[in-house]
Amino acid sequence: MPGPLDGVRVLDLTRLLPGNYGTLLLADLGADVVKVEEPGRGDYIRWTPPMVGGEGAIHRALNRGKRSITLNLKAPEGVRLLRRLAEGADALIESFRPGVLARLGAGYDELSTANPRLVYCAITGYGQDGPYRDRVGHDINYIGYAGLLHATGAPDGPPVLPAVQVGDFGGGMAAALGTASALLEASRTGRGRLVDVGMLDVVTSWLGVLLGWRLATGTPPLRGGMPLSGGLACYRVYRCADGRYLTVGALEPRFWRALCEALEVPELVEEHYAGPERQRAMGERLERIFAARTRDEWVERLAELETCVGPVNDVAEAMGDPQVRHRGGVAEVAGVAVGPGPAISLSGLDRAEPRPAPALGEHTAEVLAEVGVDGDTVADLRAGGIV
């Protein structure tokens, strides 16, 4: 059964994590995603270590199921070809700094004039306007500006970087959502939109808990001291006898009661939401208890009880987890794992084996033929460094 975006053509001019992840989400929903890359070099993610078989491992993970063409946008003929491709596309997603494509004659205004239905999504660090519009940045900067980094880490330690790039992947997901929403509208109205995704905006939108705390108390959230970042003994990570860790998330009273009974500390049940001093004392008590057994012993003992306890897996363990495997969390190409599987499951949609990530320019002739460029012309374009 085809996916809900079957027949939708998306031109992907992005580089690195945000756009690659966003267009992967669209490809998994059935869109025909065509990466438009620089001849001879391509998306930087192709040669970002570690390498597997001459390809960047992250490229293999995030660009499966897509097609690739090369196009020199520094040449007028390359820009003309991009416009031609955009005339038949449903969406275009780019991650250049604001105004770059417009200066080349291929911005939203120019492309939407020729194709009013086109959805044009621009992913940037800070958005298309505002005082930071033209600043450069990376994920670490966005989470720093947003206040998220300040609140992350142990109470007496420095801010700690998350292991996953929050702004980048969040920005990619926002781009996919915004693009899909605008495509739905265009199907009804015949008009596309500019989808303006600023990664700082996305991170800021995730601050409901932290900002709610600040607005209610008048003080910044305490690093490692918020209810869901270490302030509650019932919602923490605990070290076990073998040096590995458990997650405990017994927030609801019935889960906390079940945990206390299983750990034989029923006297703690009524102190579930006690003040900070008691939380520290209860946390120390639980630390001593969990330190008496190995992680897997605790998992075996508690996982089937309603205690909200689980392991802190490393990535290899996570990819072998039976629930992750059952849900298709590992994408395989020809029996070889290449990265995470689709994020969204839809009823009636079979999980077909994905195509491998494309070689640079692998589909140039194929895609250009679809807009009427013949083989001889493609050969001339190659000779001229246009593709």
Image (spheres, rainbow, N blue to C red):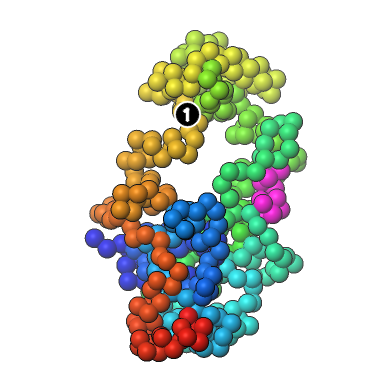
Q: Position of residue 221 (x, y in %)?
A: 70, 39
Vertical side of 375 occupied by 276: above or below: above
Left or right of 335 in this view: 219: right
Q: Which element carries disc 1, helix, strand or loop?
A: strand
* Region rendered in magenta: 140-150
Indicate the quadrant where residue 227 lies: top right
Left or right of 380 in this view: 221: right
Q: Which residue is drawn at the image coordinates 28% and 56% (left, top)?
A: 352
Residue tagged 1: 311
Q: Position of residue 316 (x, y in %)?
A: 45, 38
Residue 237 in sight from this viewpoint = yes
Badge 1 amino acid: Pro
Vertical side of 284 occupied by 148: above or below: below
Left or right of 335 in this view: 182: right
150 or 243: nearer the eye?
A: 243
Circle 1: is it few (<14), some (14-19), or many (20+) Cα within 10 Å?
Answer: some
Q: Which residue is drawn at the image coordinates 32% and 67% (left, top)?
A: 6
Q: Which residue is drawn at the image coordinates 70% and 68% (left, top)?
A: 133
Q: Position of residue 115 (x, y in %)?
A: 45, 84
Vertical side of 34 occupied by 145: above or below: above
70 or 371: nearer the eye?
A: 70
Magenta stretch holds residue 146: yes
Left or right of 331 in this view: 52: right
